[in-house]
Image (spheres, rainbow, N blue to C red):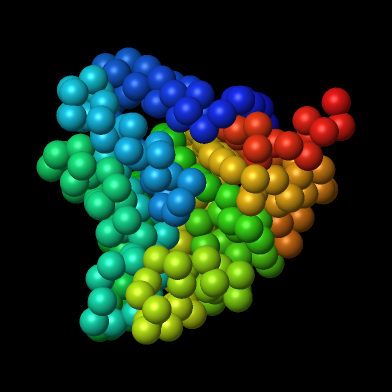
Amino acid sequence: MNFHILDSEDTWTNEIISRLINKVNSLQTQSLKICLASGNTMVPLYSRLAEKFRRKQIRTENIQLFNLDEYIGVTGYDHGFCGQFIVENLLSPAGLNLELINFKPNQADKSFGIDEYEVRVGDGFDLMLLGLGLNGHLGLNEPGSEINSPTRVVKLHEQSRKSAKGYFKKEVSPPELGITVGMKRIMDAKEVWLLVLGESKADILYHVVKSDVNQNIPASFLKMHQNCHLFADAKAFRKFLAQT
């Protein structure tokens, strides 16, 4: 795992955006499949990224965007879903007419579009932008997930349900189930960026880095990935900085 520790949210955002622009704009003919996470960590990043798209500073003709995970079991209400988060925070502000390849959480036959999604992913992702859950999850690969787990329906841990509740109205019960890209797809991706921001993630980031690789902290699997980059701000990295 390659470490990139930035001193503030602003420099953290700028570093990630700069690297992403260079990666996308250096493409020749091949398509770049990018998998995107949702959540509070992504808000400042998507805001700045949308600005770059509006100013035509990033090429769009050769990129495909995928949603990492999605909640299911919440009916009659569309705000709060992960795909909707990406649309509202990135695609719409950027004025992008790009398809967000997503699951189908309300599909009647309960297949949720997983097979179709997997076909679109094909031989794998070129780049994944992942957040870090407070319980160490990646996407909705909760503690206990195996390193070779497939894209699938999962039961959310209580910590994840509490986090999800913040994205829905008070009268809406937080979802119990979700769909997630599996750990196998994550480990097979050509490049993974783990994005960690803020003091609330300091404890779990410390455990991810210091623990042995184990399925109780799914993010620890990334230490075995051949091309993983950790981007953290000083607040998220504070437990390490306190030791120096």
The residue nearer to you, when weighing 106 against 87, is: 87
Which residue is outermost to the right? 243
**Residue 5 point in image, percent of width and height:** 64, 26
The residue nearer to you, when weighing 8 against 23, is: 8
User: In what quadrant of the picture does the C terminus appear?
Assistant: top right
**Residue 235 point in image, percent of width and height:** 65, 38
The image quadrant that residue 34 belongs to is top left
Residue occupying image coordinates x 48% and y 46%: 41
Residue occupying image coordinates x 59% and y 43%: 198
Q: Is residue 157 left or right of residue 25?
A: right
Task: Give the vertical position of 60 relative to 118 (above or below).
Answer: above
* Residue 124 visible in the picture: no
**Residue 203 point in image, percent of width and height:** 73, 50
The image quadrant that residue 29 belongs to is top left
Q: Is residue 41 left or right of residue 144?
A: left
Q: Is residue 69 left or right of residue 142?
A: left
**Residue 77 point in image, percent of width and height:** 26, 76
Q: How many marks?
A: 0
User: In what quadrant of the picture does the N terminus appear?
Assistant: top right
Residue occupying image coordinates x 32% and y 56%: 85
Residue occupying image coordinates x 28% and y 67%: 79
The residue nearer to you, when weighing 188 against 91, is: 91
